[in-house]
Image: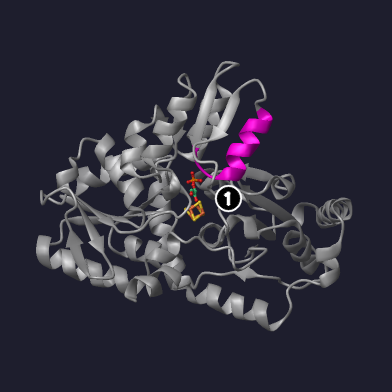
Amino acid sequence: MHVQMSVIRLSKERDQMIDLAGAHSILNVKDLQMDSVELDQRIADAKVRLGERVVILGHHYQRDDVIQFADYRGDSLALARVAAGLTTAVVIIFCGVHFMAETTDILTSGDQHVILPDPRAGCSMADMSNLQEVEECWDVITQKFGLSIMPVTYVNSTAEIKAFVGRHGGITVTSSNAERILTYALQEKKRVLFLPDQHLGRNTGAKLGVSLEDMSVYNPAAMELEFPHGEGDSRLILWKGHCSVHQKFEPRHVQNVRKKYPDIRVLVHPECMYETVQLADEYGSTDYIIHAVQNASPGTKWAIGTEHNLVNRLAKEHPDQFIISLNEMVCPCLTMNRIDRPHLLWSLEQVLEGNRGHVVTVEPETAKWAKLAIERMLEMS
Ligand code: 13P
Ligand code: SF4
């Protein structure tokens, strides 16, 4: 019961946005019925009319028909950097998920506002930890181990978790800088609490030489530590969260694809489980995966374990290589896919009409502490 509640719990701001979306029909039925050519044309026209006042940021996992309109495309680290440098845009439309829009709001000025075209575009992983649970965890682990613990959170977390981390001397991390940041954290403190993705934490810790026995798992439902590989020193305390998309790439998929294509290279994201990563030929962040394919020779065969939209796009962009998903049955990230052209068009036209649309704002005290944790990361990346 407790687990389910923690999984579906949304941030307060997003709850309010979703209520709003329900109260007023967010999309005109006409917009949904518009044909594809007309939709593209109206989005392009709105962008021209809005000019430099509006910037569209798009994460690599977005659908092709949406990402084509992004002024900047990137992984979460790259987009956080772009957001921090945007000085002239008044409105930033974030085609991605809620925690990314929150990060953008935190890194931009009070005069700029950030719009998430569909407020239901959350991230199931980010929703697997909330502030109350993290505070309970902190009590449990500081009572057991003392205060020499640094909290480190993957940016795939709510602003309030980032703020908790900032307040407790910690730092955020993305999949592209996880090794560097975790190395620093383990040097600074005896132990690290890694939130909310146990897989990124475990894969990165193992790469840095922390043994599996020295990693424990904090289960927020039971409010206790688990020791899946035997009780060692708990240098790394992993929050029991995961990505519902990347968790679907299992060791058996690596074995199957290798049987079918003996010369294939298996390349996976570190949100995949440890056993899958261990069997892969290489692993790395979204950015790493894109560069690995860009730098490969024609004829290279890849089975890639990451979000479907990105894998399909890589296959289209590199027809001289053979690129498939490591598990063809995995769906695209459903929440990333909530951002579609009708929602993007609606958001742009709201701005044109002088309305606000689905603005994401982080309350100032939370933003202050979350920013500290994010800036510590940006300085080190
Ligand atoms: P990146 O940090 O690689 O952009 O990943 C974000 C994400 O949501 C992965 O599932
Ligand atoms: Fe969240 Fe996973 Fe989707 Fe990334 S792919 S946004 S971690 S649910």
Quadrant in which the C terminus is drawn: top left
Residue visible at 46% across and 66% down in the picture: 367
* Element marked by disc 1: loop
Q: Which residues are magenta?
A: 305-317
Residue 49 placement: quadrant: bottom right
Q: Is residue 148 above or below residue 67?
A: below
The x, y position of residue 327, in whole percent, is 50, 41
The x, y position of residue 82, in whole percent, is 58, 46
Crowding around mark 1 (Cα neighbors within 10 Å: few <14, some 14 to 19, many 20+) is some
Tell me if 124 is positioned left or right of 117 in this view: left
Relative to the observer, which residue lies in front, 246 or 237? 246
Q: Can the viewer see residue 369?
A: no
Residue 141 placement: quadrant: bottom left
Q: Is residue 202 above or below residue 89?
A: above
Residue visible at 19% across and 40% down in the picture: 210
The x, y position of residue 283, in whole percent, is 41, 33
The residue that label 1 is drawn on is 332
Q: Determine if the magenta segment contains residue 310.
A: yes
Residue visible at 69% across and 55% down in the picture: 89
The x, y position of residue 229, in whole percent, is 17, 48
Relative to the observer, which residue lies in front, 193 or 148? 193
Tell me if 95 is positioned left or right of 172 in this view: right
Which colouring convention does the figure follow?
A: one colour
Residue 170 placement: quadrant: bottom left
Main SS of the magenta part reads helix
Q: Mark 1 belongs to which amino acid?
A: Pro
Q: Determine if the magenta segment contains residue 361.
A: no
Q: Is the residue marked 1 within 8 Å of ligand 2, measured from its CB?
A: no
The residue lying furthest to the bottom in this view is: 23
Q: Is residue 6 above or below residue 67?
A: below
